[in-house]
Amino acid sequence: MKIDYTSDSHFDFYIHESKPITSGRVRVMLDRYWRFTKQRRGDVLIIAGDMGHYNLQNIEIMKHIKEQLGYKAIITVLGNHDRYLITKAQCKRYKNSSDARVNEFKTMMNTADGLYLLDGDIIEIDGVKFGGSGGWADGSYDDSTKERKQYLFEEIMSDYRKISKEKDGFDGSFDYFFKSEYAKLEMVCDKSDIMISHFVPLPEMLKERQNADNNFYTFNGEELLKKTSARYWIFGHRHQALESSKHKVVLLSSPIGYKEQPYNQTIRQIEV
């Protein structure tokens, strides 16, 4: 099986949310901004999170991509942006609940032919098992204090401002979602041939780019890498192509990124 992979498609940066999603608009987006490293398209496309800010738009664009490029399936996980409420209209629609937006997206994906959202799940296609979840940061990139990390999270990360803080939900902590997301990944990692997360599963992969926000892009997944049956782990979040190998697992990312980041827009391919 040939598998194309990318992440951080951020569809609404390429097609404005007010525009109807037509075959022509999607074709222009693909022709202008999506570059492929292989002439032959893969059988399956992985988009490792951050599809975009609008559920219906995400679904409709992925349907067109699947049809136009001939994929059997498109497999996704949730990214941090897929939890955002960025407009007053969204806050009203989802009653200031990011969970409501996430649940709506899950329902839409579950009823769309050939589109799959992994949230601690495994999907098998032609004998290949794909497992994953979005993941979340644990602050393990450096040894600064938790108080310092929380201060930076509130100061520089849109996650703090754009994910709703609910009475029984997100409390604004930088690592709030980590334990539940890690548990989902742990649940499927020893049963999967391909693992997928949005967050970078190995902090050392970000050492060459010394940014103050690295703590919020990665988690220590080394125990999962030791345990997993997967040959590949596909991820995203940091808008740069990354590649490494640890515990016999090849870790890969190739994000599309924002429109002003043309150097990122490459869809790469693996074969299993």
Image (spheres, grey):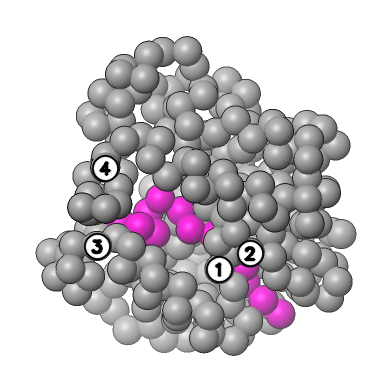
What numbered label is drawn on residue 72? none
Q: Amino acid at mark 3?
A: Ser
Q: Position of residue 207 (x, y in %)?
A: 57, 20
The residue sitting at 24% across, 76% down in the picture is: 18
Mark 2–mark 3 contact, CB under 8 Å? Answer: no
Say which label, 3 or 4, has the lower sequence index: 3
Quadrant of the rendering where the C terminus is positioned:
bottom right
Q: Earlier in the sequence, mark 3 or mark 1?
A: 3
**Cα distance in 3D space between marks 3 and 1:** 20 Å
Identify the element where label 3 is drawn.
loop
Does the magenta-highlighted stretch encompass residue 127? Answer: no
Q: Which residue is mark 1?
A: 117
The residue labelled by disc 4 is 171
**In 3D space, how far apart are the residues under numbered discs 2 and 3 (Cα atoms)?**
23 Å
Looking at the picture, which amino acid does disc 1 mark? Answer: Leu
Q: Earlier in the sequence, mark 1 or mark 4?
A: 1
Give residue 25's quadrant in the image: bottom left
Q: Residue furthest front?
A: 168
